[in-house]
Image (cartoon, coloured by chain):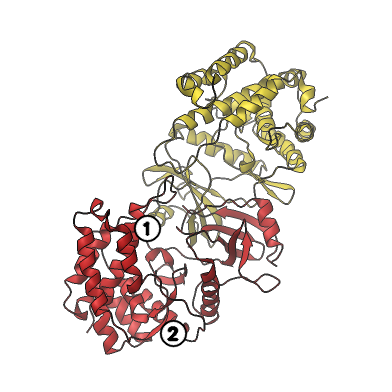
Chain colours: A yellow, B red
Amino acid sequence: MAVYTDVTDEDLEAFLWAYELGEVLSFHGIAEGVENSNFLLKTDRGSYILTLYEKRVAREDLPFFLGLMEHLAVRGIRCPTPIHARDGTALRELKGRPAAIVTFLEGLWPRRVMPEHCAELGTALAELHLAGADFQMARKNALTIDGWRPLLDASATRAHEVKPGLAQALGRELAHLEANWPSALPRGVIHADLFPDNVFFRGDRLSGLIDFYFACIDYLVYDVAVCLNAWCFETDGAFNVTKARLLVANYRKRRQLSTEEVEALPLLARGAALRFLLTRLYDWLNQPAGALVKPKNPLEYVQKLRFHQGVKGPGAYGIQ
Amino acid sequence: MAVYTDVTDEDLEAFLWAYELGEVLSFHGIAEGVENSNFLLKTDRGSYILTLYEKRVAREDLPFFLGLMEHLAVRGIRCPTPIHARDGTALRELKGRPAAIVTFLEGLWPRRVMPEHCAELGTALAELHLAGADFQMARKNALTIDGWRPLLDASATRAHEVKPGLAQALGRELAHLEANWPSALPRGVIHADLFPDNVFFRGDRLSGLIDFYFACIDYLVYDVAVCLNAWCFETDGAFNVTKARLLVANYRKRRQLSTEEVEALPLLARGAALRFLLTRLYDWLNQPAGALVKPKNPLEYVQKLRFHQGVKGPGAYGIQ
C-alpha cells in the first residue's frame, strides 16, 4: 500500500488552486507503489495521479524525473506527463512534501507475464532509449556497480539470517563484477526499474510505462539486463528463453545492439540480479516497525543470479 | 489501507466474463476502508468499485446489504448500486471470497466537517429512512444494546491498559442503558455507521452515501444518535450544538420525529457512543500482528460518552 501521507479535501482544494484542472469529482488513495503516496484524482477535465514524494526519493532528483517524463511524453512515449500549474511549475509542495500531478494512464499490469508481453516490452524499451537520446539533464545511477559495495557492507553481518554464507558469496560475485564491469558501452537515459508492475497493457498491447523514479544515465543495454531478470523467469525460477528472445529481438528491431553490448549482456544480467538482490536484502533485514509494505524476499534473486553465473554467452538469452 | 487480497489481471478477466461491462481500462486497489478489499475498476462503459468481502463481513448478510443498496438506489438515494451479471446475480465469488461490483460514486468525504455538511447530512439521513421503509429484508443490529455486554466482557480484563477504571465505568454505563433502553420507537432500515468517510460531497452538496455493511433494522432515531457522535464533536472534544441543530432540524423537515423519539435521543446518543467505544476498545486491545490498519483510539469516545452523560435533555442537541 502506498498512502503514507493523508491529504484532506481542504489540502487538496488549496493545492489545486494553483492549477487549471476544473472541479474535483473524486479523489482516492491508491494501494500500489512502495516509495511514494499516490492518489487517483478525477476532475471534470480528466483523470490524474497526484504523487507526494516521501523520504526515499531525493528532492534534488525530482526535476530530472519530471523533466524526463515530459520529454518522453512529448516524443510519443506512453508515460505519465507532468501537469503544469498556472505559474508554469510542475514540481510543487503539499503537506510539506514535494508533490506533482501527472496524467493518468489506462491499462493493467500483467501479473502473469506472457511471451507477447515481452515482445511488446522490447519494442517499448528501445523506443524509450531512442526518445531519451536528446534529453539534456543528467542523473547518475546510484544503484550501479560503485553503489553495490556500500550496500553489501550494510547487510554483510546479518546476511546469513537469509541464507548461510550469503555475504561471502555476494562478496565474491561483486569482486568479479568490479573486475570485469565494462567501461565503454553506449550510454543514455534508462528506466532502471522496468518491472511488470510498471508496464501497463490493454489486452496484449502495451499501453504505458510508469514509475520513472529510478531513471538515470547508464549503459542502455543494462536496462535490457534488468528486464531479462524482471520478465523472463518463471515463478518456479526457470529461465524462459522464448520470452528473452522475443524481448531482445524486438528491442533490436528498433535499436541496434553493438557486438560489445551483446557480449556484455551476461555480465550485466549478473549485475542487475545483484542490484535487486542487494536492495531487497537490505530492506528485508531493515524492516521498520509498523511498515505498511512487506519487503520482497531476496532469495528470488539469489536463484536468478545463479542462473546468470552459469551462462556461457549471449546465446543463453536467445541471442544469435 | 484496504487491499487484503490481490486480484491479478487474469483473475479480473475471468471474473468479468460473467458481466457485460465492456473493456477494462484500468484497475487499482484503493487505500481506504477497513473491512474489505476495494478496487476502482474503469471500463469503457463507466467506473465501478469491485469489493471482495473479507472475513469480518458475514456471508449470510451480503444479500441484505446488496439488496438494500439496490432498493435505495432505485428510490433515488445516491448510493452505490450493485451491477448484475448476465445471469442476474449481483453477489458472486472471486479468489474464494464473496465479491460484488457496484457503481462508483463521485465526491469527496469531508475531513473537516462544516455546519453545511451536517445540514445536508440530516436531509440525506431522513431520505434514507423514508426510502428504506418498504424494504422487505431484515437484518438484526448485532451491535446494539444486547450485543454490548459480550463486547465489554471480552475487553474488561485489559480495559485498564487504555484507562484505569475503564471497565468499571463502562459496566455502570451499560447497566444504566440496559435498564432504560427504549422498547417501542419507530423502527426501519438504518445505516448504523454514517461517519464522514462514508458520505461524499461535491462542494457543499452531498453527492453520495457509501458503505452499507453495518446497515440493519433498528430504531430510526438511533441513526441520528450515531451521526451526532460522528459529526458534531470538534477535534478538541467540544460538542458543536450548531452542527447538531442543523443536522436534526434538516432531518425533521423530511421525516417528523415523535415526542418519544426526541425524548430518547440523549440516551440513544449515550448508547451510540458506547457502541463505538466498545468496538474500538476491542480492536485496540486485539491488534493482529502485521495489521495493515491502525485501530482508532477508543479514548475519543470516552470523552463523547461523558458529554452525553451530562446532558439534561434533547435541548442540549439544539432541539426545541
> Quick one: SS at disc 2?
helix
The mark lying in front, picked from 2 and 1, is 2
Residue B128 x/y as whole percent = 44, 79
Identified by mark 1, the residue type is: Glu
Residue A299 x/y as whole percent = 58, 30
Q: Chain of mark 1?
A: A
Q: Nearer the viewer, residue B83 or A67?
A: B83
* A52 in relation to A254, above or below: below
Residue B16 x/y as whole percent = 68, 61
Quarter of the C terminus of chain B within the rendering:
bottom left
* A137 in relation to B60, above or below: above
Q: Which residue is tagged 2? A: B130
x 50%, y 83%: residue: B135
Circle 1 Cα neighbour tier, 10 Å, few/some/many (<14 / 14–19 / ≥20): few
Q: Which residue is tagged 1? A: A10
Circle 2 Cα neighbour tier, 10 Å, few/some/many (<14 / 14–19 / ≥20): some
Q: Nearer the viewer, residue A274 or B35?
A: B35
Could you tell whether B319 is left or right of A108 in the image?
left
| Disc 2 to disc 1, C-alpha distance | 32 Å
- Residue lying farthest to the top in this orientation: A179
